[in-house]
Amino acid sequence: MIKLHELKPNKNSRKRRKVVGRGLGSGHGTYSGRGAKGQKARTGGKIRPGFEGGRMPFIRQVPKRRGKGFKGNPVKMQVVNLADLAANFSDNDKVTPEGLFERGLVTDPRRVKVLGTGDLGGRKLVIENVLLTKSAKEAILKTGGKVEEAHVAESAEK
């Protein structure tokens, strides 16, 4: 059994701090690793992040996006056709964004829209929480399907 007085850290796990300014023979004498003169050699001589020696900094050269503030990368609309629904769902199946994601029809279930391209093949589907175009909604209702809690979009791409 190990005793408390026998405990010690692993070999090379504790690194000695660099001792500077202790004479020429130490290897860190004279300028103490700061180089000769200049702003960075002085006490308190810091340079703010992004400073590039007085020239126009890169961040100021890059054009900014217009509008109110910076907008991140918007979530792209995931598009699914009626033909895709017919190929992956059977009669009376619920079509949800999560279901489309599980079947590999979309890569991101946050923004999904069903377009009216293709044919449902007579399948009755229940659509939930998915954006639809008018033509897609008409086609789903025409085959006897249902649309629950979905919004109808004005155009095919928004």
Image: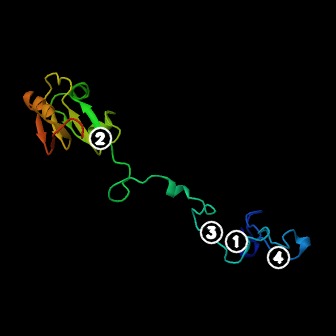
* Residue annotated with mark 3: 47
Q: Tell me which amino acid carries mark 1.
A: Gln
Query: Compared to 51, does 77 lie above or below?
Result: above
Q: Is tag 2's residue or tag 4's residue first in the polypeptide sequence?
A: 4
Q: Nearer the viewer, residue 57 or 99?
A: 57
* Residue annotated with mark 4: 21
Q: What secondary structure is marked by label 4?
A: loop
Among the 4 quarters of the image, the one containing residue 137? top left
Residue at x-position 70% and y-position 78%:
43
Q: What secondary structure is marked by label 3?
A: loop
Query: Compared to 10, does 151 lie above or below?
Result: above
Left or right, 124 with reference to 1? left
Mark 2 nearby-residue class (10 Å; few <14, some 14–19, many ≥20): some
- What numbered label is drawn on residue 39? 1
Q: CA distance from mark 2 to mark 3?
A: 44 Å
Q: Position of residue 82 (x, y in %)?
A: 21, 28
- What numbered label is drawn on residue 77? 2
Q: CA distance from mark 2 to mark 4?
A: 62 Å
Q: Position of residue 72 (x, y in %)?
A: 38, 52
Q: Is tag 1's residue or tag 2's residue first in the polypeptide sequence?
A: 1
Q: CA distance from mark 1 to mark 2?
A: 51 Å
Q: CA distance from mark 1 to mark 3?
A: 8 Å
